[in-house]
Image: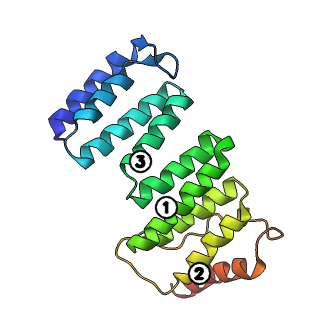
């Protein structure tokens, strides 16, 4: 999608938001069916991804969680080979629909397994899995994330993030394997010594 096409689409959205129409999700702004039509004719993967992002933004603006979750899952299906999208979907479901706890955890674990198979974004995905696990108080899954992160300590990839420790203080040490937690914290101390 070139810049002029992008501008043309985004320019139409404010006017379409003012119009409402019926849907299986209740009344929705007409910007949503408009973007669905654009997605159906998009010719490239990047265009579809960009349009899905606009679509999810419109669902969020209209405060329609059912539509948001439906199209979030649809986007995850379209981009099921992308660990970032898969883990992001899991995180969004955990926040928007905590009752779908198991789905969120399954998607997050699946995203990590995908990253490992692709040998990219493993630390990033494992870190996000840890955050999702904490959000949902899923300590077995948290331990899996920490185990993966610890096993990655000597692995460097061009496509990955570094270690992050901002979530460690949220971990209840009584509910998490003490050795794992200590080993992960040790990575932070080793990082600080290496500065």
Q: Secondary structure at mark 2?
A: helix
Marks 1/3: CA–CA distance = 12 Å
Check the image and name the residue furthest to the right: 174
Q: Give how far across and how far down residue 105 sits, in percent.
A: 61, 56
Give the quarter of the image for residue 173.
bottom right
From the image, tell me which residue sits under label 3: 77
Q: Give how far across and how far down residue 32 sits, in percent.
A: 38, 25
Q: Nearer the viewer, mark 2 or mark 1?
A: 1
Q: Secondary structure at mark 1?
A: helix
**Residue 111 tag number:** 1
**Residue drawn at x 57%, y 76% as measured from the top left:** 148
- Residue 161 visible to an observer of this rendering: no
Question: Of label 2 and label 1, which has the lower sequence position?
Answer: 1
Q: Secondary structure at mark 3?
A: helix
Question: Of label 3 and label 2, which has the lower sequence position?
Answer: 3
Q: Nearer the viewer, mark 1 or mark 3?
A: 3
Picture colour scheme: rainbow
**Residue drawn at x 41%, y 82% as measured from the top left:** 156
Instruction: Please tell me which residue lies in front, 77 or 36.
Output: 77
Q: Is residue 13 left or right of residue 166?
A: left
Q: Nearer the viewer, mark 3 or mark 2?
A: 3
**Residue drawn at x 50%, y 71% as measured from the top left:** 123
What number of labels is visible?
A: 3
From the image, tell me which residue sits under label 2: 150
Question: Of label 1 and label 3, which has the lower sequence position?
Answer: 3
**Residue drawn at x 84%, y 70% as measured from the top left:** 174
């Amino acid at each position: 999608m070139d810049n002029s096409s992008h501008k043309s689409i985004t320019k139409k959205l404010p006017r379409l938001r003012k119009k409402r129409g019926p849907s299986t999700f209740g009344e929705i702004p007409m910007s949503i069916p408009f973007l669905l039509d654009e997605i159906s004719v998009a010719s490239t993967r990047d265009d579809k991804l960009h349009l899905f992002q606009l679509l999810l933004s419109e669902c969020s603006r209209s405060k329609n969680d059912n539509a948001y979750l439906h199209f979030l899952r649809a986007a995850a299906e379209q981009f099921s080979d992308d660990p970032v999208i898969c883990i992001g979907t899991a995180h969004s479901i955990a926040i928007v629909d905590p009752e779908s706890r198991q789905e969120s955890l399954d998607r997050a674990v699946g995203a990590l397994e995908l990253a490992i198979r692709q040998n990219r974004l493993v630390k990033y995905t494992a870190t996000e899995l840890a955050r999702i696990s904490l959000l949902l108080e899923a300590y077995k899954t948290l331990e899996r994330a920490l185990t993966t992160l610890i096993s990655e300590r000597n692995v460097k990839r061009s496509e990955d993030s570094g270690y992050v420790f901002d979530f460690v203080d949220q971990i209840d040490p009584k509910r998490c394997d003490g050795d794992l937690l200590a080993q992960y914290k040790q990575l932070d101390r080793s990082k600080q010594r290496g500065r």
